[in-house]
Image (cartoon, helix red, strand yellow):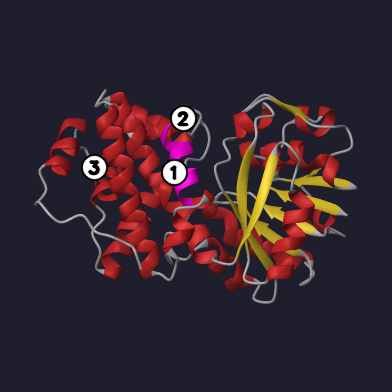
Amino acid sequence: MKLTILGAGCWGLTLAWLLTDNFDGVCIWGRTRDLSEDLIKNKHCTKPLEVQLKSTVVVTDNLKEAIKDADIILSVVSTAGVRDVCEQLKKAGINKNQIIVNASKGIELDTLMRMSEVIRDVLPEQKLAILSGPTLAKEVLAGKPTAASVACEDTNTAKFVQQACNVPNKFRLYTNSDVIGVELGGSLKNVIAIASGFAHAMELGDNCMGTLLARGMAEIVRISVKLGAKPSTLYGLSGMGDLIATCSSPMSRNYTVGSMLGKGKKIDDILSELGSVAEGVKTSKAVCDLAKKLGEEVPVSSAIYEAVYTDITPQEVLSKLMNRKLKEEESYEK
């Protein structure tokens, strides 16, 4: 069995490292400018993370060769690039029976589509699953255990990916038929993770962090349920599990962005310093657009959108959140 990974960033390289022994062959595809000589020749890189791959892993910028005979194609490109890569896959002659497993967490800004919707828009007949959960790359590379969800409406496809990508003692996979819930949980929590880093930098305390996670989760549930997700999915691995991990760890890029915003730094400087994608930055705009479309309030996400895209100060952000009109706490016991 062959695995092809699209995207040579943090998570793409980590998955290649993690899954090599599960497959007869592993190939990583990336744009020419994203593939260093060290990675191509030595299967090693130091940025954005240090990863040493086995010599058997193939690294290439030739997409047609990369996907040839692949049983599973793991897409780990930035959400802004998913549509373009799918167009390239179509030109490269992807077989409709090859399974695309999307591991990118975000929403397409122009269309407000989830990544599975974007992929289906370009490749309507493709077998497709979603991989999402609490998966901080540095911890996975350190051999620390975690679990994630494989979401697919087709049970057989989900089970195939589950069996192929499960790694004993390290990477436990669960199947889930709620694609909408798994995708939105993994995408929307990135905005709350920015808020968490923001609050930590301002030294607002543990009570505030508990409040932030609870109210942030309420926003995720409100939006996701309106879009067709099951509430129970959002309290699982790809929702609450991922939220807790990314909101409590400086290893999270979104948390790091929030921390730097909370110290008064500007977003352009932050992203330049970070040197890698933090999906929550663009998702903060997407979730606000979705909320407006759905007639829902998302105060935490709205505050982060302002913090990212305007000159509002950290103190003004806090004041706006704490002095909103008083209301009843909602319940999703249905």
Amino acid type indicated by mark 2: Ser
The residue at which mark 2 appears reads as 249
Residue 45 as seen in the image, left or right of residue 240: right
The image quadrant that residue 207 belongs to is top left
Cα–Cα gap, marks 1 and 2: 10 Å
4 vs 63, nearest the viewer: 4
Tell me which numbered mark, 3 or 1, is placed earlier along the sequence: 1
Task: Give the left or right position of residue 176, taking residue 218 as reference.
Answer: right
Specify the label residue 310 is tagged with: 3
Q: Earlier in the sequence, mark 1 or mark 2?
A: 1
Q: Residue at left 50%, top 52%? A: 236
Name the residue beneath numbered marker 1. Answer: 243
The rendered magenta stretch, by its main secondary structure, is classed as helix
Per the model, the C-alpha gap separating discs 3 and 2 is 26 Å
Secondary structure of the residue carrying tag 1 is helix
User: What residue range appears in magenta?
Assistant: 239-250
Is there a contact, CB below 8 Å, between mark 1 and mark 2? no
Extreme residue toward the front, this view: 333
